[in-house]
Image (cartoon, rainbow, N blue to C red):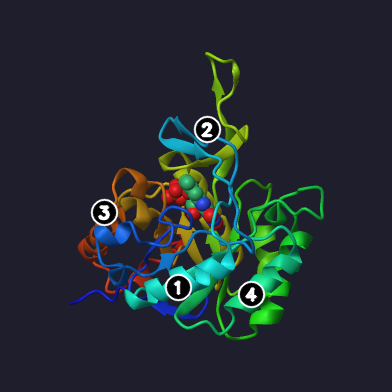
Amino acid sequence: MTLDFGTTLGGAWFPSPIFTASGCASSGKELSQFFPLREIGAVVTKSIMLKPRAGRPTPRMAETPSGMLNSIGLQGPGIDAFLIEDIPWLAAQGARIIVSIAGETAEEYAVLSRKLRGVFGISALEVNISCPNVENRGLVFACDPNSASEVIKSVRSIIGGDLPILAKLTPDVTNIASIASAVINSGADGLALINTVLGMVINTETMRPHLGGKTGGLSGPAIRPIAVRAIYQVREALPNVSILGMGGVATGKDALELILAGASGVSIGTASFGDPSAVIRIQRELHQLLQDKGFQSLKEAVGFAHRQE
Ligand SMILES: Cc1cc2nc3c(=O)[nH]c(=O)nc-3n(C[C@H](O)[C@H](O)[C@H](O)COP(=O)(O)O)c2cc1C
């Protein structure tokens, strides 16, 4: 019996449930030296903004127990260069592409959507709303249901029915299911859970914050139980909404944990920094593990941990 490894996210079909995580594989060029990008579910590109950005002050990385803290900020070339250089290159590799977008105002997300609408080769948009809203005291969009909804509505109004929209949420909220409901009611087709967790490291030599940006996003195995919890809670509240899960996945077994909690796909982030073949290895391990457990399809395993019997 061969395993049906395909999955759907917000209506888009992918042959494998394993993806890259936004910001951890840039546009995929480096990883393509280690495996053909078309063999994984899709490449999720680094969040792209309207204008080129330099990112935050250095140092931008700190090692932490079972994880890392980064304050790279949304460094990148801006949407116009991205559309000329990255999308055609990825499409030429035969890779499926999920484009992640980020902005400082709801209007910026709308402008990005207008530029992406109708571009050949894009399977879905991941809307990163874990960014500060400059029009609302710098409060992160995804920490406030109204701001989160406003962004998703503005993207949906431009994209129409052309592309599935996945809203990427932060776990730094009291009730993630309520933010998830707000963005789904505003037109998101699915969710990406979770972005990094806000953290801080103080250098005990200098006795000052280690990162130039003071705070940073915690990622890696340290946050996996937070990801599992967030996915489980959202799946319970919104059982019909597809979830792309991420957070500390380093093995096929870790990926299975997120799937059992309710994820239909899993993105690999920090693990790729230590092992550039991690994405393809995890995909192989997950495929084997699902077969060993007697599943006939990936879909049977999605949300299995919620079963009562
Ligand atoms: C260096 C770095 C850069 C990141 N950049 C982005 C980004 O541009 N957009 C985004 O939505 N998430 C970004 N993330 C978050 C990841 O996509 C992912 O949600 C998070 O790291 C948890 O997964 P992991 O533990 O497998 O890394 C970044 C994470 C890291 C470590």
Where does residue 158 sit, x and y in percent of width and height? 68, 80
Q: Are marks 3 and 2 in contact (CB under 8 Å)?
A: no
Where does residue 293 sit, x and y in percent of width and height? 24, 62
Classed neighbour count for the residue bearing mark 1: other residues with Cα under 10 Å, few (<14), some (14–19), many (≥20): many
Where does residue 147 sit, x and y in percent of width and height? 76, 60
In the current view of this chain or complex, which residue is farthest to the left? 1
Q: In terms of sequence position, does the residue under pointer 4 or pointer 2 come before the other?
A: 2
Cα–Cα gap, marks 1 and 4? 15 Å
Q: Amino acid at mark 2?
A: Pro
Regarding mark 1 in the picture, which secondary structure is present there?
helix
What label sits on residue 113 in the rendered view? 4
Regarding mark 3 in the picture, which secondary structure is present there?
loop
Quadrant including the N terminus? bottom left
Q: Closest to the observer: 108 or 9?
A: 108
Q: Of tags 3 and 1, which is closer to the observer?
A: 1
What label sits on residue 87 in the rendered view? 1
Task: Judge: label 3 CB < 8 Å from ligand 1.
Answer: no
Q: Of tags 3 and 2, which is closer to the observer?
A: 2
Which residue in the protein does label 3 denote? 277
